[in-house]
């Protein structure tokens, strides 16, 4: 087997470093002994996620938009995590989202090509759209509305996948694609509008929990430490085709709300609100490939993961953040 890229890596670039996953990734890479250069244009990223790295000599953050070509010196491996990712955010800044997934991804790939560096792109279960195959294996091509409100994200991510594969096929860049399913944990912004952050914030503030539609739609929630572990294992592999990294435990949104009420001990009520357009009906990763290829599977179930987040969301409430119902 070829020597894994990350094993010889010295300086690693993480785009979207101030984001939820990007910041956890920086921590994990620093813990492995690497030097990390983080990039973020702070459009949806949050400097508070990196506050604890202030004074860390092996970490550097540069405020930069990946849509503008850049080169901040040689890097050995690149993780491309820069993109708005919450539906509330990407619907609000759709053009920026499309640009990040097209021009931005290309600029990052160009750098990987120039320095003959390894490259891992953060793709998404949204590539499957509103899936008609359940659970979703990587071989499923998806069911995406190319002109609906979510298309700014879905099609940007699908375009990115095509661009990444093309840089691999035409230029021999050493690429990887991770399809990330719903992930949660500390550093999810309390106001980012995602279901776990909204429900936790609402429960802790005694507000009604907003459930869109009838709450029978499903998601499969992966705790952040499991997600990062899977991503790092993929980076060390030689797999160029997409790999699902997510927790296959599937929950209806209503069941998820009940879990939140239980772990927080909140007496909040449930309030039903309209279902956003093109909201996927079901979502659950088939992780056979990750298990076989990477020896990876998640360890933390939803109840345990939610408990691990309570303190963080309590602090978010104290900072004055508010849930953002769509
Ligand atoms: N959702 C909800 N209440 C909320 C926020 C989200 O019922 O306050 C639903 C949303 O309609 C979707 C699911 O929860 O069916 C997951 O939404 P999220 O925005 O977290 O991510 P998505 O998986 O849709 O990208």
Image: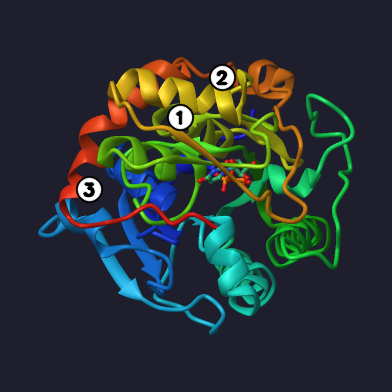
Q: Which residue is mark 3?
A: 317
Is the C-beta of the residue carrying label 1 under 8 Å from the nearest atom of ligand 1?
no
**Quarter residue 63 falls in:** bottom left
Name the residue rendered at 15%, 49% in the picture: 318
How dense is the environment of label 2, judged by Cα within 10 Å: few (below 14), some, or many (20 and up)? many
Q: Which residue is mark 2?
A: 296
Rendered view: 192 above or below 211: below
**Side (left or right) of 64 relative to 67:** left
Residue 128 seen in render: yes
Residue lying at the far bottom in this picture: please name it: 68
Rendered view: 159 above or below 322: below
Q: Label 2's element? A: loop
Q: Say which label, 2 or 1, has the lower sequence index.
A: 1
Q: Quadrant of the N terminus?
A: top right
Q: Which residue is mark 1?
A: 229
Is the C-beta of the residue carrying label 2 under 8 Å from the nearest atom of ligand 1?
no
Labels 2 and 1 touching (C-beta < 8 A): yes
- Asked whether 240 or 49 is in front, the reply is 49
Name the residue rendered at 52%, 75% in the picture: 66
List x then y, in percent, for residue 26: 34, 49
Q: Label 1's element? A: helix
How dense is the environment of label 1, judged by Cα within 10 Å: few (below 14), some, or many (20 and up)? some
Q: Quadrant of ligand 1?
A: top right
- Could you give the CA–CA distance between mark 3 and mark 2, rounded to whole angstroms? 34 Å
Name the residue rendered at 68%, 33% in the picture: 244
């Amino acid at each position: 087997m070829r020597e894994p890229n990350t094993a010889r890596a010295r300086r690693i670039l993480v785009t979207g470093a101030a984001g939820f996953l990007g910041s956890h990734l920086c921590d994990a890479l620093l813990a492995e002994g690497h030097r990390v250069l983080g990039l973020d244009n702070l459009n949806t990223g949050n400097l508070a996620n990196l506050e604890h790295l202030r004074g860390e000599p092996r970490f550097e953050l540069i405020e930069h938009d990946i849509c503008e070509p850049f080169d901040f010196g040689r890097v050995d491996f690149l993780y491309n995590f820069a993109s708005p990712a919450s539906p509330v955010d990407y619907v609000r800044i759709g053009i920026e989202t499309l640009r990040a997934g097209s021009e931005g991804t290309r600029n990052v790939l160009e750098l990987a090509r120039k320095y003959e560096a390894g490259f891992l792109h953060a793709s998404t279960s949204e590539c499957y759209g509103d899936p008609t195959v359940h659970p979703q294996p990587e071989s499923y091509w998806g069911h995406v509305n190319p002109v609906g409100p979510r298309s700014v994200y879905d099609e940007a991510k699908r375009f990115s996948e095509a661009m990444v594969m093309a840089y691999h096929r035409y230029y021999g860049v050493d690429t990887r694609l991770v399809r990330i399913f719903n992930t949660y944990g500390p550093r999810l912004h309390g106001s980012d509008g995602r279901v776990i952050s909204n429900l936790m914030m609402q429960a802790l503030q005694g507000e009604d929990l907003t459930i869109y539609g009838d709450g029978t739609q499903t998601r499969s929630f992966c705790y952040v430490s499991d997600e990062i572990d899977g991503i790092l294992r993929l980076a060390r592999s030689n797999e160029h085709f997409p790999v699902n990294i997510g927790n296959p435990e599937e929950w209806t949104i209503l069941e998820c709300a009940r879990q939140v009420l239980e772990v927080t001990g909140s007496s909040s009520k449930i309030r039903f609100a309209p279902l956003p357009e093109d909201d996927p009906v079901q979502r659950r990763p088939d992780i056979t490939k990750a298990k076989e290829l990477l020896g990876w599977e998640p360890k933390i179930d939803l109840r345990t993961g939610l408990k691990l987040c309570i303190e963080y969301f309590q602090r978010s409430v104290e900072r004055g953040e508010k849930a953002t119902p769509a």
